[in-house]
Image (spheres, rainbow, N blue to C red):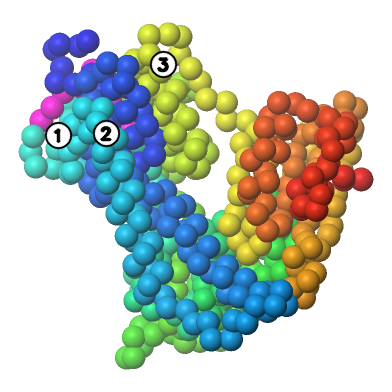
Amino acid sequence: MADQYDYDLFTIGAGSGGVRASRVSAAHGAKVAIAEEHRVGGTCVIRGCVPKKMLVYGAHFAEDLKDAQNFGWSTQNATFDWITLRDNVLKDVDRLEGAYTDTLENHDVTIFHERAEITGAHEITLAGGKVVTAKYILVATGARPQIPDVEGAEHAITSNDAFHLDKIPEKIIIAGGGYIANEFAGIFNEFGSKVCLVNRGDQLLRSYDEALRERLLLISMKKGIDFKFDTVFEYIRKTDDGRFKVKLSTCDEEVVDQVMFATGRKPNTEGLGLEKVGVELGEKGEIKVDRFSKTTVDHIYAVGDVTDRVQLTPVAIREGQAFADSVFGGHDPVAVDHSCIPSAVFSHPPIAAVGMTEGEAKNKLGSVKVYQSDFRPMKNVLAGRDERSLFKMICDGDSGKIVGIHMIAPDAAEMMQAAAIAVKAGLTKADFDATTAIHPTMAEELVLMR
């Protein structure tokens, strides 16, 4: 390929999107280098979805142990040790970092463990001073937690820090209403913290169906989580004993052990030299790209959270794959279809969704039919757990085509993956009805909804 450059591709950022793009480009025959200033693996693997899901599993044993008693198991002496879980999770993160590094090295991708900046049209300067050139540059630097402008904000932790705590806080305030806030509220609550979730708006999980949001709120409150809506922080002040005085706009000052911000994520575009070479940014600092992930500069591309299209790991991976196939695969450019993307919130219980909510469908389609199933899972009945699950199916009233499925139930995400294929493929309610139920399961409700 391009002899006048050191590399065919230089990727900045070794997260899910950057690693996939680099590996596939190298497999297509490109000479590739990648720079990463933190750890190979990125947010998802190192300080996001993967360790978070492990904590969710760990937290869920609190309920499983309680529920087991009605199934005849004696669990009286069960105790929880946070340090054991924390260290085992971090050990697995180390293993994954090694696996991601091996993947790159096995494909002859050169890894620079340092920050990189674009200093000329095809030129990259590494923190150590080394200058290299590349025919194509891919920016995959992801996003980071956004810290609100509050007095004492420096005393708060973010999701990044949650995996490294020395002990579980007795009392924690979590700011935010999105999936990260709700997931950590559930995790800390199961581990015995007194959790208060503070949201400046009036609703949780804005992009999810209203019925599911209300159900999660109801169940979470029953589990002992406090919620304060339309509330902002006035200050956070450290006390002499290492705790924090927190003043919220709607209540008196209180003392807590920890404050956590989960108030959205901000694209990592500062200090990369993007403006100097003419890469256009949006108002949140995100890199503007076309459907092929190309920036306003022909040879510079961007994928993943730094583009703020859909901030989900599998989307970044698909974008990285499409970039590599388009630029180095020797065939027509490939664009990622960002419609109908399934997603999940690993709350207690989890939420999973694909397609339009009831509100969106009514706005877009006019004629809409909604089917739902509101039930107590069999396991909850015997466990004596008064917790109901809810499935919703949204259909186009004229064609019967399913345009959305939404569920809050144990293992919702596991059930949703297969259901999402059906929605993406354009199947109808009649197709689901024609499928025999697997009994007894929660998933059978998908084909029995009335």
Most extreme residue toward the left, as rendered?
129
Query: Is disc 2 surrounded by few (<14), some (14 to 19) or many (20+) residues within 10 Å?
Result: many
User: Which corner quadrant of the image does residue 252 belong to?
Assistant: bottom right
Query: Is disc 1 surrounded by few (<14), some (14 to 19) or many (20+) residues within 10 Å?
Result: some
Q: How many numbered marks have been drawn onto this rendered protein structure?
A: 3
- Magenta span main SS: strand
Locate residue 38, reporting x and y percent.
25, 50
Ranked by sequence position, the earlier of labels 1 and 2 is 2
Instruction: Work out how far the residue at label 2 is from the one at label 3, CA to CA, in angstroms.
Output: 20 Å
Q: Secondary structure at mark 3?
A: helix
Ranked by sequence position, the earlier of labels 3 and 1 is 1
Q: From the viewer's perspective, is the residue at label 2 or at label 3 nearer?
A: 2
Give amino acid for label 2.
Leu
Q: Which residue is mark 3?
A: 326
Looking at the image, residue 448 sits to the left or right of residue 214; the answer is right
- Tag shown at residue 125: 1
Q: Quadrant of the N terminus?
A: top left
Q: Where 17 falls versus 450 (above or below)?
A: above
Give amino acid for label 3.
Ser
Tell me where the magenta segment starts and ends, as one range.
131-139
Q: Which residue is mark 2?
A: 104
